Amino acid sequence: MIAKASLTTSRSSARPSTLGAINRGPIVRGGPWLSPTYADSTTEDFIDGEDLDVRRAAVAALGPYNGSVVVTDAGTGRILAMVNQKLALGSGFQPCSTIKVSVALTALRERVITPSSKVNGIDLKYALAHSNNAFFATLGTRMGYETVSKYAHLFGYGEKAGLNVPGEQAGRYPSGPPANGGMGMLTSFGEEISQTPLELAALMGALANGGKLYYLQYPRNPSEAQHFVPKVKRELDLKGLIAEVKPGMLGAVEYGTARRIMNAVQDQPIAGKTGTCTDSHTHLGWFGSFNDTGARKLVVVVLLTGGKPVKGPVAAGVAGDVYKNLGSVNYFAKSSPPATIPATLLALPMCCK
C-alpha cells in the first residue's frame, strides 16, 4: 500500500493570521483570486518512492504557501520529491517569464542574436537577469510563430514530461500566435501556453546536464527507486548554447529578479529564471533552477498560486530554502546513485540540427 504523505513542518503553524480571509477570496487589485495564497500543500501526496531528505527540505521550504515544489536529479531524470502532486500533475498554468529561457535558446540557435547583440539597448545576459519583456517580445516578432513553436515542442512543451507517471497531464501549446498581443506576448509572458512544473523541470535538467532531455520518472516504492533506470527522451543539440544562456540565469540569482534566493544560497551558484503573471484570476509565481556546482546537480522548480503576494521572487526564495536545507545535510556532496543499467534512449529526434 502506498503511504500518504505527512511530512509537514513547524513552519506550517506559522501561517499568517489572514489565512481565513484569504481562503474566502478577498477582493484585491486584479482579483478576485480563485486560488488561496496559503494552504496545506501536502494533504493528498503519496511518497513511498521519494528521497525523504529531499521531501523534508521541500516541504519545509514551501511552508504555508499554496503551491508545488518539484525536485529532480538532473543526471537521471528521477523525480526525487513532488510536493502538492495534484497541482504538479495537472494541465499547468501560463509559464509567465520562464518561457524566456526557451526563447533565448531558440534565438541563439537560429542566430537571430549572439550573446553580445543589443536589442533595445541591452544584451541577453541583462535581459534574462532582469526579465526584460521588450527584449523577448522583439525576438518573438523577428523569429515568427513557426520557428518559436518548432523549438518549443522539441524542448518539451505541449507533451507529457514524465514516463508512466500516474495522473500526469500534458501542458498545452497554442496552434498559432495568441490573439492577445501576438508573438510578443507569447515570447515574453507565455500567453496561451500552459506549462506544467514537470515540463519546466525537464528542460532545466537538460540545461544542467548538457543537453539530455530525460523522461521524468517517479518511483512509487523503494524497490523502484533502487532499480531506477534513466531514460532519455531526446538529445538536444545545445552545444555552446547553455554557456550562452547560463550567465543571464546566474545573474538573475546574483543581482536580478531572483536575488531573494541569495539570502539562502550565498556561496552556491544557482542558475534560474523567475516568472510572475496572472492566469484566469490566479496569480502565479514560478521559479525554475539548478545548482551549478557539486557532485550532484538537482533541478528545483517552484510554482506558487494565489493572490497578490504570489510572485516569481517569492518562488525563488522558496527554492533557495530547498537548496539551503539540502546543503545543511551535505546532500550535494553525494553523487547520484548509479543506475542498474546504462540510460536507455527511447527516442532520438535531434533538436536544432
Image (cartoon, helix red, strand yellow):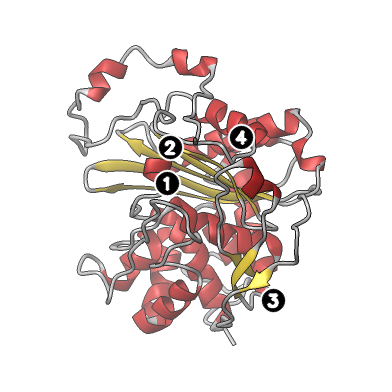
Cβ atoms under marks 1 and 3 closer than 8 Å: no
- Compared to 132, does 13 lie above or below? above
Q: How many marks?
A: 4
Q: Label 1, on which residue?
A: 88
The amino acid at mark 2 is Asn
- Compared to 26, does 139 lie above or below? below
In-front residue for pair 26/329: 329
Residue plotted at (67% across, 32% down): 53
Give the class, few, some or many, for how many residues have Cα within 10 Å of label 1's Cα (few <14, many ≥20).
many
Residue plotted at (41% across, 16% down): 15
Residue plotted at (62% across, 57% down): 77
Of tags 1 and 3, the one toward the viewer is: 1
Alpha-carbon distance for marks 2 and 1?
6 Å
Alpha-carbon distance for marks 2 and 3?
35 Å
What secondary structure is found at the residue carrying circle 2?
loop
The amino acid at mark 3 is Lys
Q: Position of residue 209 (x, y in %)?
A: 70, 62
Alpha-carbon distance for marks 4 and 1?
17 Å
Q: Which comes sooner in the sequence, label 4 or label 1?
A: 1
The amino acid at mark 1 is Ala
Cβ atoms under marks 2 and 1 closer than 8 Å: yes
In-front residue for pair 10/108: 10
The amino acid at mark 4 is Val
In-front residue for pair 199/32: 199
Q: Position of residue 244 (x, y in %)?
A: 66, 68
- Compared to 17, does 229 lie above or below? below
Q: Is residue 220 left or right of residue 342?
A: left
Label at residue 239: 3
Of tags 3 and 4, the one toward the viewer is: 4
Label at residue 84: 2
Q: Label 4, on which residue?
A: 322
